[in-house]
Amino acid sequence: MTQFRPNFLPMAIGSLPYTDPVVALDKLLRYTPDIPAWPQLPDRTFLENMYVQYSEGFPGVVIKIDNARIYVDRERDLDPELEQLYMRYLDNDLEAGVLGVDYAAGLAHFFTHRFDGVRAVKGQVTGPVSWGLTVTDQNRRPILYDEVLADAVAKHLRLKAAWQERELRKLAPNTIMFVDEPYMSSFGSAYIAIEREQVITLLEEVFAGIEGLKGVHCCGNTDWSILLSTSVDILNLDAYGYAETLSLYPEALGAFLDRGGIIAWGIVPVQDEAVLMAESAQSLTEKLDAAIKLVASKGVSLDALLASALVTPTCGMRTLSEAGAERALGLLADVSRHMQQKCL
């Protein structure tokens, strides 16, 4: 992979409120032309829900579109399907990771586009912790609590990520593959019975299938030292609401930056459209500048922070209106430009 310089470039997280992949990609190319991401369109069909989207081919999976439910039927004999998954994993058979057009219309359209002059193209896959805690068995028990299925989840998602990256590499030499882990914001709570080492093991299994830059996204507070201790290259956080929590881990963050790590600062708030509409490019630039200086005040090199920054929305934009999504993308591009003028 050629040298990648983040330079406060704008980058999207994934989901958008559109249902037409052509419209969605046009918006992304307009506002994030340097690092286009393929658009996830969960309002188009339940199959594009971020958990259903990567379920195709998983042993025992059942999708009920009429009542919007996905689960794994443990009452079936899963051994033949598990054996097939493990064989394809051992053979590195990336065709096992195909995302069909019914599950990812935005990706199918992305593959038809030319990407001349981009810095990188971005893909994404739901992470094993979030996927394994959201997808349950027929009795609504998260499959991550089943040792066999938890391991299968990581291997399944590794194949999904590796297939996607292989196909994206045909479009541009530089790829960024994100592993989205919203459920990491609940790590350590009474609601999630999972240990630090299991999180790292599951993530590293997926990361091992990614050859280019690999990122992880968490849109809430978490123990950032866990994610920073993995082999991840890009850490994406909700810097609008949680920058202070990142400052609590200066040693782990410093080591991450020393090895070339990149921080993607999620500064454009997209969880609440009213909050989004109340902000301006200037106010968000000032908030991002303050967040970076706060982290630097804890002993992390300011120069390293400035040299390793991307800017993103705080999360995916599925909950916004179409007008709200376009405003968010416009603010993202403006904040990127302001930070480049200010810091580079």
Image (spheres, grey):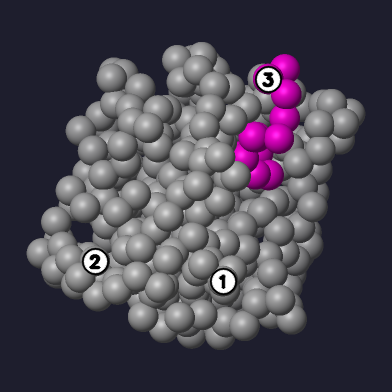
Q: Residues within 10 Å of mark 2 (few under 14, many from 20)?
A: some
Q: Which residue is mark 3?
A: 322
Query: Would you say 174 lies left or right of 123 here?
Result: left
Membership of 234 in magenta stretch: no
Label 1 SS: loop
Query: Would you say 211 lies left or right of 143 here?
Result: left
Q: Which residue is mark 1?
A: 139
- In percent of width and height, residue 313 lies at 65, 39
The three-letter amino acid code for the residue at tag 3 is Glu
Q: Main secondary structure of the magenta part?
A: loop
Membership of 319 in magenta stretch: yes
Which of the pair 143/73 is nearer the observer?
A: 73
Report the residue at 68% width, 65% height from top.
185
- In percent of width and height, residue 8 lies at 57, 38
- Find the magenta span and give its range: 311-323
Q: Quadrant of residue 235?
A: bottom right
Which of the pair 97/211 is nearer the observer?
A: 97
Q: Is residue 50 above or below residue 148?
A: above
Label 2 SS: helix
Label 3 SS: helix
